[in-house]
Amino acid sequence: MFGAENELKQQSCQGDRPKALGARAERRATCGIRPPALLFDISPGKRERDWRVSKSSGRASATAGNIYIGVGGWTFAPWRGVFYPEKLTQAKELEYAASKLTSIEINGTYYGSQKPESFRKWAREVPDGFVFSVKGPRFATNRRVLAEAGDSIKRFYDSGVLELGDRLGPVLWQFAPTKKFDEADFGKFVELLPRKQDGRALRHVVEVRHDSFRVPSFIALLRKFDIPVVFAEHGSYPAIADVTGDFVYARLQKGNDEIKTCYPPKQLDAWAKRLQMWASGGEPDDLPRVDAGKPKKAPRDVFAYVIHEGKVRAPSGAMELIERVK
């Protein structure tokens, strides 16, 4: 059932596949360990350096939603000494990453269930205002008949994901590049997604990666259920910028590790403007849409993740965008 999904061999517990860094490339599938303290010895003579910084996403106002920006996962060996300080222990990596970013996409949940105590621990390690997005399990999306995914979806929500509390953002349901659009079956799938659990409203977003989804009937279906589609900036996956829900979710996957800021400054400026336009209720006119219809203009939260194949410079790109949308 999962043979068509090559990504199972390409992703680690939290992030997408790293670009090989010679024979020394390393991939760790650790899902994070709670750091015991905020202070650490970063260099001789500086025994109590506090790395916490004043950062802000684009915060909600009467005319615009929040803008959350981050990367995929937090445990990635090539970030050590590039994004993470040289002497930062692995146990402190999530806390450090959350001090620099405003969101992280958790991918470990795509491969298997996590423990409730893990979700609680991760929630404790990040500051107020920080939000995780969480990938739904592959067992729900990598199947021939999506209408039969109900048990997998229920097990996912019963696994303890709500222990993230107010740190829980959207759940991302990612489909294989080989999965084609079947309106009836896909409609049954989105009907299965719970709107509330334990009195809490839930958010869902779908990432489709086959060109058959680039049809107005798909856009109409998502608007009926108020579910966004991921805008994927990718070399081969379809780019669908239609706004179909009350928030926007973008995955930016064309970064370049040869550039210190991941993207050239002009491209970062352009992306910052697009994120701000989405947040204020507009739609960028330079991104491809499938349907000619326009949604009602209203403030929207925006979630954007810098997730390219190599991803060494992804945190730098995300921090550059955070600065630009302040």
Image (spheres, grey):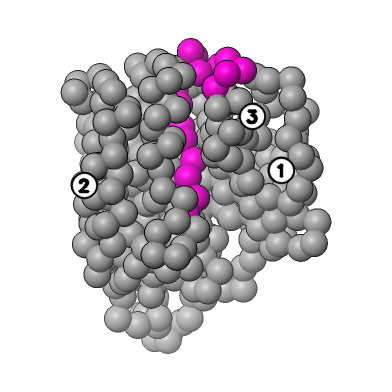
Q: Are marks 3 and 2 in contact (CB under 8 Å)?
A: no
- Residue 23: image quadrant is top left
- State which region is magenta: 202-218
Q: Amino acid at mark 2?
A: Gly
Residue at left 57%, top 46%? 304
Which residue is disc 3 drawn over?
241
Front one among 285 and 25: 285
Name the side, left or right, on which 174 lies relative to 266.
left
Q: Which mark is residue 278?
A: 1
Secondary element at image label 2: loop
Residue 137 part of the magenta segment: no
Mark 1, Cα crowd under 10 Å, few <14 / some 14-19 / many 20+, is: many
Closer to the chain start, of discs 3 and 1, is: 3
Mark 2 to mark 1: distance in Å? 33 Å
Q: Quadrant of the N terminus?
A: top left
Would you place residue 218 above or below residue 75 in this image? Answer: above
Secondary element at image label 3: loop
Q: Amino acid at mark 1?
A: Trp
Asked whether residue 265 is in view, the answer is: no
Residue 216 part of the magenta segment: yes
Q: x and y percent of residue 225 in the render? A: 55, 37
Q: x and y percent of residue 153 in the render? A: 30, 44
Mark 3 to mark 1: distance in Å? 10 Å
Residue at left 75%, top 30%? 294
Q: Which mark is residue 112?
A: 2
